[in-house]
Image (spheres, rainbow, N blue to C red):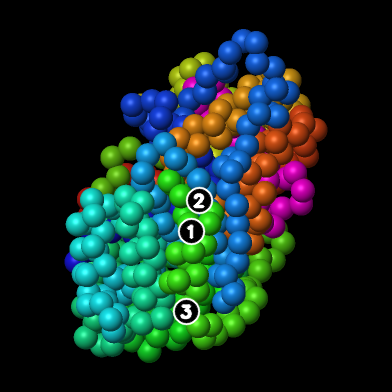
């Protein structure tokens, strides 16, 4: 069995690729963080003006891209500080593309990709990575499935050969499907069924996305997972695991010419076997009413409150909207100086934590979340009213110039921190390109953040922080004999 850690099965939406930058900043800047987003990043030298900082920051400025003759996109991110590389293959197929009644098949296929090919038995690829001192992993999102390794640069050609082989030679039959199906069912039991917060997350998503497949858990519904077959997996594999539906991202001690030569010799030889075509998904009707979900469980020791708003993603938003939502999330709920934390935790003393984040990485929709946990025996209704008051103040009166500049400065600092991790850069770029965004959209993101105005934030708050677009979830303790 490989040692991968798959995508969390929780129903909660993952943060956007920009929140991945925030996570990078947190890792580099602090020894530990709570559920809230990282604290304020340093402002930098006093002599550096906001305009100069904006002009200087660019994500992966030396990255380049090209396309192989079979349609496979390739991105190269040079980083010559150490002789290592991160090799990442993204397929533009995710859980939201699962056929009706077959939820979880994209995630299941991710597992099966480690079960061996006609040329290489199960475990050989992982052994090669381990012998070379490398690490590997894989994950499934709503919109993509990705496989990656980090290893010494001299092994890059070997990685490409193995990855190209399993793009076209995977063996899927009942002998591998049956036991691995038991593995994903146990994964669901462990990560969702035994975790009340994950169960609430699934319920919130199902209520937020009433028609779109984002409301279906990435890991799948148990009753449908139990019926997944070898033919289901083969159908997905044959249609979507084709080079013209894939993106290769290589970050590390390489040049574009090196990567092109190796990619053409390996991936370039894989034949196109399908045309996946455009993604036609059921879309959301206009939201008409706020929804509330409450989960009471005896395993819950401390109550919590959260609200998710249906908003556009970076791929679906109008120009400037997603950037405004990112900055709004920073001002409203990122760190101890944010509006929510300073009001609920510091001033009022009614919450032990509070924050907000924008998840804008998906193809069709994003979500904007606010959350809080009560301090002591403070009623959740009182906590909710306090959160609503903070949101209403921003929606009605906007943000201050100082708040706006501080948020931009923090966000640009996170972009700088992200440059320190080649694997983080590979993930940021892959996430964006798998949802149709070009490389330069990633590179120029700090500049677009710098263009956000107070008026942009006011417009985003007015349009999207509308209760009719929201689902509010509460997680509360329950007596041991009951669960609801």
Q: Residue shown at 56%/28% (left/top)?
A: 413
Q: Please state, as top left, top right, bottom left or bottom right, where the N terminus lies in the image.
A: bottom left
| Quarter where residue 386 is shown | top right
User: Does the magenta segment cover residue 406?
Assistant: no
The residue depicted at 25 percent of the width and 77 percent of the height is 120
Pick the quarter of the image with the C terminus.
bottom left
Residue annotated with mark 2: 255
Determine whether 351 is above or below 70 in the image: above
Query: Residue 270's mark?
Result: 3
- The secondary structure type at the circle numbered 2 is loop
Gap between marks 1 and 2, in whole Å? 6 Å
Q: Secondary structure at mark 1?
A: helix
Q: Which residues are magenta?
A: 312-338
Left or right for 194, reference 253: left
The tag on residue 178 is: none
Which badge, 3 or 2, is on the more N-terminal residue?
Answer: 2
Residue at x 25% of width, y 88% of height: 174
Instruction: Report crowding for label 2: few under 14, some 14 to 19, many 20 or more residues within 10 A (C-alpha).
Output: some
- Tell me where residue 455 appears, x and y as whole percent: 80, 33
Callout 3 crowding tier (Cα within 10 Å): few <14, some 14–19, many ≥20: some
Q: Are marks 3 and 1 in contact (CB under 8 Å)?
A: no
Q: Which residue is mark 1?
A: 259
Cα distance, mark 3 to mark 1?
16 Å
- Sort mark 1 into few (<14), some (14-19) or many (20+) by Cα contacts within 10 Å: many
Whether residue 449 is visible: yes
Circles 1 and 2: CB distance less than 8 Å? Answer: yes
The vertical placement of 115 against 61, above or below, is: below
Tags 3 and 2 in contact by the CB under 8 Å rule? no
Q: Position of residue 337 (x, y in %)?
A: 54, 20
Q: Is residue 97 visible?
A: no
């Amino acid at each position: 069995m490989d040692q991968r850690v798959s995508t969390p099965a929780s129903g909660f939406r993952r943060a956007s690729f920009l929140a991945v930058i925030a996570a990078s900043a947190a890792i580099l800047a602090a020894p530990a963080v709570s559920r809230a987003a990282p604290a304020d990043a340093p402002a930098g030298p006093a002599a550096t003006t906001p305009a100069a900082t904006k002009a200087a920051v660019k994500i992966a400025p030396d990255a380049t891209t090209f396309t192989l003759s079979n349609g496979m996109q390739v991105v190269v991110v040079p980083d010559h500080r150490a002789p290592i590389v991160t090799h990442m293959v993204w397929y533009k197929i995710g859980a939201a593309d699962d056929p009706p009644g077959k939820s979880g098949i994209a995630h299941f296929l991710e597992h099966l990709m480690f079960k061996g090919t006609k040329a290489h038995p199960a475990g050989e690829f992982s052994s090669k990575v381990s012998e070379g001192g490398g690490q590997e992993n894989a994950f499934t999102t709503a919109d993509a499935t990705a496989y990656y390794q980090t290893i010494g640069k001299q092994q890059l050609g070997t990685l490409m050969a193995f990855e190209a082989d399993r793009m076209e030679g995977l063996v899927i039959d009942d002998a591998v499907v049956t036991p691995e199906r038991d593995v994903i069912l146990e994964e669901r039991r462990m990560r969702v069924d035994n975790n009340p917060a994950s169960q609430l997350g699934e319920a919130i998503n199902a209520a937020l996305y009433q028609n779109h497949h984002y409301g279906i858990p990435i890991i799948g519904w148990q009753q449908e997972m139990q019926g997944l077959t070898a033919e289901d997996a083969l159908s997905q594999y044959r249609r979507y695991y084709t080079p013209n539906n894939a993106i290769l991202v290589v970050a590390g001690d390489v040049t574009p010419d090196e990567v092109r030569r190796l990619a053409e010799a390996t991936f370039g030889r894989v034949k196109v076997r399908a045309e996946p075509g455009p993604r036609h998904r059921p879309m959301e009707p206009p939201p008409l009413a706020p929804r509330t979900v409450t989960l009471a469980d005896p395993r819950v020791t401390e109550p919590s409150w959260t609200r998710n708003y249906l908003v556009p993603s970076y791929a679906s938003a109008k120009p400037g909207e997603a950037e405004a939502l990112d900055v709004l999330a920073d001002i409203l709920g990122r760190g101890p100086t944010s509006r929510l934390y300073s009001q609920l935790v510091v001033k009022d003393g009614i919450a032990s934590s509070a924050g907000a984040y924008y998840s804008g990485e998906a193809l069709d929709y994003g979500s904007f979340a606010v959350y809080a946990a009560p301090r002591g025996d403070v009623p959740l209704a009182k906590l909710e009213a306090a959160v609503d008051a903070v949101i209403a103040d921003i929606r009605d009166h906007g943000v201050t110039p100082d708040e706006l500049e501080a948020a931009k400065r923090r966000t640009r600092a996170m972009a700088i921190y992200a440059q320190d991790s080649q694997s983080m850069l590979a993930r940021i770029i892959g996430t964006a390109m798998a949802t149709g965004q070009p490389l330069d959209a990633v590179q120029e993101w700090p500049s677009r953040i710098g263009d956000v105005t107070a008026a942009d934030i006011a417009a985003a708050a007015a349009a999207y922080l509308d209760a009719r677009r929201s689902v509010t979830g509460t997680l509360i303790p329950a007596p041991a004999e009951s669960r609801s």
